[in-house]
Image (cartoon, grey):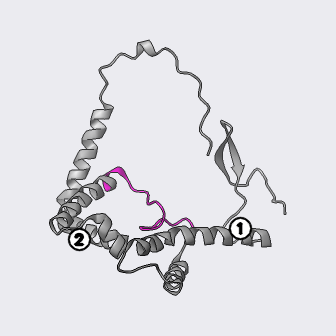
């Protein structure tokens, strides 16, 4: 199958062997898939579902009281996950979630508080994640952040201070470095 590529076709930047070019993106919402496109989409769907559910099997294998996860039990988890899966949507416990620096710092401080609370009870975050899944840790973290609004304020203060320090002029002479060597851009 060939695609109609015109000057109006949307494009995205890509780097090939150090050269940035604009690659056509001919697929839009409502595009009718060919047999091969459907096969490629189904393969990607399968890989994403597999990757995003591997943690359940790993957790079951590590939990000595539970033993290996049964195929029927995993099938239920996979079916539940697949019914709500959306391409490109990032979620907790799945693929990487993109957050701003203040949110990342807020989570870091909250998780440190959670780690201290768990330690006082004789637990670790890893043990809770293994036994109950990452959702339990997220539940506890949400409780901590909801009841301690000062955490978000402290995170914002820290990030603001770091940015101010980075924006201030560095007291260092770099004259002895000379000119930078030309390095090829990283490939995407």
Query: Viewer-proximal residue, 140 or 117?
Result: 117
Q: Residue at x 67, y 72 (%)?
A: 42
* Residue 134 shows up from this direction: yes
- Mark 2 — residue? 143
Q: Quadrant of residue 183?
A: top right
Q: Which residue is mark 1?
A: 40
Estimate the spatial distance between the alpha carbons at disc 1 and disc 2, rounded to whole Å.
Answer: 41 Å
Q: Secondary structure at mark 1?
A: helix
- Magenta highlight range: 87-103
Question: Which residue is located at x 49 percent, y 81 percent?
Answer: 77
Where residue 170 sits in the image (x, y, percent)?
Answer: 31, 24
Nearer to the camera, 26 or 137? 137
Q: Earlier in the sequence, mark 1 or mark 2?
A: 1
Vertical comparison of 70 with 148: above or below: below
The answer to whether residue 71 is above or below residue 169 is below
Mark 2 surroundings within 10 Å by alpha-carbon count, few (fewer than 14), some (14 through 19), many (20 or more): few
Name the one closer to the observer, 121 or 139: 121
């Amino acid at each position: 199958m060939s695609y109609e590529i015109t000057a109006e076709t949307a494009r995205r930047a890509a780097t090939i062997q150090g050269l940035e070019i604009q690659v056509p993106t001919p697929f839009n919402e409502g595009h009718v898939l060919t047999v091969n496109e459907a096969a490629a989409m189904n393969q990607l769907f399968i890989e994403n579902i597999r990757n995003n559910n591997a943690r359940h099997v790993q957790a079951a294998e590590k939990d000595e009281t539970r033993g290996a996860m049964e195929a029927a039990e995993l099938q239920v988890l996979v079916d539940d996950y697949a019914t709500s899966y959306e391409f490109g949507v990032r979620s907790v416990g799945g693929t990487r979630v993109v957050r701003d620096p203040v949110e990342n710092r807020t989570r870091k401080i909250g998780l440190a508080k959670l780690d201290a609370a768990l330690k006082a009870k004789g637990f670790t975050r890893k043990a809770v994640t293994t036994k109950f899944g990452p959702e339990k840790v997220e539940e506890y973290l949400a409780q901590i952040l909801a009841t301690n609004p000062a955490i978000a304020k402290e995170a914002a203060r820290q990030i603001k201070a770091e940015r101010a320090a980075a924006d201030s002029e560095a007291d260092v002479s770099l004259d002895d470095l000379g000119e930078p060597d030309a390095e090829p851009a990283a490939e995407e």
